[in-house]
Image: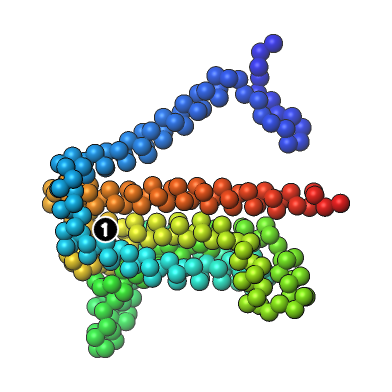
Amino acid sequence: MTTQTHKTHGAGPITEAPWVRRLLITMALGFMLLFLILPLAAVFTEALGKGWAMYWNAVSHPDALAAIRLTLLTALVAVPVNLVFGVAAAWAIAKYEFRGKAFLTTLIDLPFSVSPVVAGLIYVLVFGAQGWLGPWLAEHDIKIVFAVPGIILATIFVTFPFIARELIPLMQAQGNDEEQAAIVLGASGWQTFWRVTLPNIKWGLIYGVILCNARAMGEFGAVSVVSGHIRGQTNTMPLHVEILYNEYESVAAFSVASLLALLALVTLVIKTAAQWRMERELKALAELPQERP
């Protein structure tokens, strides 16, 4: 009797023929090898192809160090801002019913549907020399576009959905029972948040912060529009890599790119660990009603 694909009634497992499982696993591994492992290996191979001395000279060049500092500064500002916004937005959407809730949810998803280049152009339109606020900013000697503030604003725009989108389904799954019990027992709003809500969402929060930080450091399109590409001043690491590559300095370009690749690998490891812990907590939460007598 041949093995066939079937599904039992209810939540039973799906049984596949052995060759189907092997084919799917092989396809998945082949895809990861082709589009993930080989590109990363190529980056490090090119970066170290001329030796450690060339690699160190590239990453310790003054322009590269300035790009690294600016990238870290941008993430250091953008991530906390998005952390505050993400927690507040997720709390409001998950815990309350109010007019405009669907509209707020749509606005949170806006950066996912808008091209980063378009986002950068929007900031140029608003804060540029010929923009809506340009004359007033010039009169008060305030520079937004082609300066660090514009880079930070553009990065905040493209990264602000990440934390909120991780927390909203987590908070909705947890419900309000524990917060209401804490309030009934006399806890204040801040005590309820710090001692009840925050411990319940900590892994989802860490997961969102990791994704937000990785995107902030790797953002190219929006930052490219508002930066002005000024060496040593408004070039982040992705922009510095582009300039080096366009100038045929491939070793230097891949050396700086390897730092971004290392960031991606570290982010992947931390993200996987945080996601595993978050899934365990969600599973335990889902099984909780079944454990009650």
Q: Position of residue 207 (x, y in %)?
A: 51, 56
User: Relative to residue 247, is residue 42 depicted above or below?
Assistant: above
Q: Is 151 on the left-hand or right-hand side of 58? A: right
Question: Residue 258: horizontal and vertical position, in percent?
Answer: 28, 48
Where is residue 33 drawn, in percent x and y?
Answer: 38, 33
| Along the viewing direction, whichever of 136 and 46 lies nearer the viewer | 46
Density class for disc 1 (Cα within 10 Å; few <14, some 14-19, many ≥20) is many
Residue with the most extreme front position = 53
Q: Quadrant of residue 129?
A: bottom left
Secondary structure, mark 1, is helix
**Rendered residue at 77%/75% (across/down):** 185
**Residue located at (82% from left, 52% from top):** 292
In this rendering, the answer to whether 160 lies above or below 142 is above
Residue depicted at 74% across the width and 29% down the height: 8
Q: What is the x, y in percent for residue 144?
A: 29, 76
Task: Name which quarter of the figure residue 65 lies in.
Answer: bottom left
The mark tally for this picture is 1
The residue singled out by tag 1 in the image is: 237
Q: Quadrant of the N terminus?
A: top right
The residue closer to the viewer here, 208 or 243, is: 208
Q: Could one spot residue 104 in this view of the protein? A: no
Vertical relation: 15 (above or below) 69: above
The residue under the point 31% across, 58% down is 220
Left or right: 143, with 95 as reference point? left
Identify which amino acid the numbered label 1 is placed on.
Met
Q: Nearer the viewer, residue 223 or 69?
A: 69
